[in-house]
Image: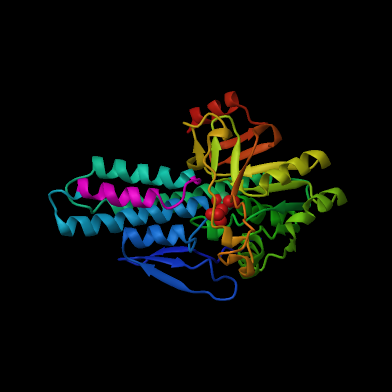
Amino acid sequence: MRIADNVRALQWTGDALRVLDQRKLPGAVEYEDFDSALGVAEAIRSMRVRGAPAIGIAAAYGVVLAAGCRHAQNPGTWKELIGEDIEILAASRPTAVNLFWALDQMRNAIASGGDDTSSLLAVAQSIHEEDIAANRRMGELGAELLKGSSGVLTHCNTGSLATGGYGTALGVIRSAYPQGVRKIYACETRPWLQGARLTAWELDQDRIPATLIADSAAAWLMRSGVVQWVIVGADRIAANGDAANKIGTYSHAVNARHHGVKFMVVAPTSTIDWDTASGVEIEIEQRDRKELLSEYFHREDSVIDAWNPVFDVTPASLIDAIVTEKGVVLNPTTEKMKLLKGQS
Ligand code: MRU
């Protein structure tokens, strides 16, 4: 059985990055072309493109666009001038380490490349293609762990929309579907509704049946015994295995442990921040209070505020498996993560 994978969030057109505007899904499927690094940075900041690997890939193409523009401005100094564009891209969102990883790859390519910009597009395209290949490999490895299971719960959107294609956690679910994992539950993922809007739309496009639940229904679902695994992605994994992911993930991990449900984090090694010893050091993005507050409370004299951290950190001790394209780490610790690093 070949499982469908029809959605692509990012496409290189030849002279621009075409972005599927995820703010508008599922109501409207609209693409927008960005032909500058500034435009790509804004696409990331505004969450037209989101999801850790997709953010990194978009930023890599942003550097390609910046290089073309800076070289046209001044072929002698473009390598210095582009530093400013890379800084703007780096400031677009703080938590997903794939952004900084991809920008480092591009910086290295600029430093080791010639005086022209011709090699940079190939580097960005290989970051894009390697992400899809990593997702397929993680799909196989994660599906192995799901042998004998029939139900899973996922959070946020970790599919083709959040990556180069296929997906991380959703990639594992795609791969496990033909082997009998048919009860797929997706949390709506407040406040931005990545689950209700994006995961539901993506699975509908690929005709993979799933059931949406309110975030607050997760513990009750786990208690029913219908899911054996919670499967999520990550925006940054610390060197000890602590994993930052969409707000609400930590609650699922606590609930999973209480109910004897296993907890799997699926992420490429580009999501691992080896320089961050543990999750306490990870910067958690806070977004606009207006994402939470209904319009009535947006007025100046309202005394109602909102606290809107959009990620949380799940401690390694609550994680049963971290699945990467280089291998699986069971019950992660700093020592086990070091062994994985040795293979990278
Ligand atoms: O705020 P978002 O939508 O960019 O957050 C996305 C997530 O938290 C995903 O779970 C994570 O990036 C992994 S995606 C493969």
Instruction: Check residue 95 for magenta coloring.
Output: yes
Q: Which residues are magenta?
A: 79-96
Q: How is the image coloured?
A: rainbow
Q: In this picture, is 273 found above or below 115? A: above
Q: Residue at x 26, y 45 (%)?
A: 110
Give how far across and how far down residue 230 sits, in percent. Answer: 72, 47
Instruction: Check residue 264 for magenta coloring.
Output: no
Q: In this picture, is 259 found above or below 187? A: above
Q: In this picture, is 328 found above or below 95? A: above
Q: Residue at x 53, y 67 (%)?
A: 23
- Quadrant in the picture for residue 72: bottom left
Task: Give the main secondary structure of the magenta stretch.
Answer: helix
Give how far across and how far down residue 219 sits, in percent. Answer: 80, 49
- Quadrant in the picture for residue 203: bottom right
Front-lying residue, 344 or 27:
27
Give how far across and how far down residue 200 sits, in percent. Answer: 66, 65
